[in-house]
Amino acid sequence: MRTGITHPDRLERLFGLVILAWISCLRVGVWLQAQIPIKVKAHGRSAMSLVRYGAEQLCHALRWELSQ
């Protein structure tokens, strides 16, 4: 697979930032799950993942939509 990034250190930093963002979303999702549980659908699976739950909350906070 080819990328436009040819410097390995830049690619490493990019992946590092992606991992930090993913971990941040997961931590917020786990914390929020303890406060307001994710709904379980009829087939027994959650309506969304913990990472998605945290990402949505972080997006709302960054947009200053603090009504929740």
Image (cartoon, grey):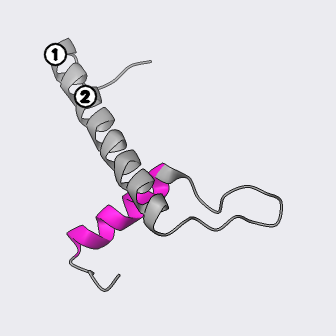
Q: How many marks?
A: 2
Circle 1 SS class: helix
Disc 2 marks which residue?
A: 16
Please identify the dominant SS of the magenta region: helix
Q: Amino acid at mark 2?
A: Gly
Residue at the top extreme of this rendering = 8
Q: Is residue 8 above or below residue 25?
A: above
Q: Amino acid at mark 1?
A: Asp
Residue shown at the point (40%, 46%) measured from the top left: 26
Q: Residues within 10 Å of mark 2 (few under 14, many from 20)?
A: few
Q: Is residue 59 magenta?
A: yes
Circle 2 SS class: helix
Question: In this picture, which residue range is highlighted in magenta?
Answer: 51-63
Horizontal and vertical percent position of residue 51: 46, 50
Task: Name which of mark 1 and mark 2 comes first in the sequence.
Answer: 1
The picture quadrant where one finds residue 35 is bottom left
Q: Which of 64/40 is in front?
A: 40
The picture quadrant where one finds residue 29 is bottom left
Horizontal and vertical percent position of residue 37: 55, 65
Residue shown at the point (33%, 24%) measured from the top left: 3
Residue at the front extreme of this rendering = 34
In this orientation, does residue 7 appear? no
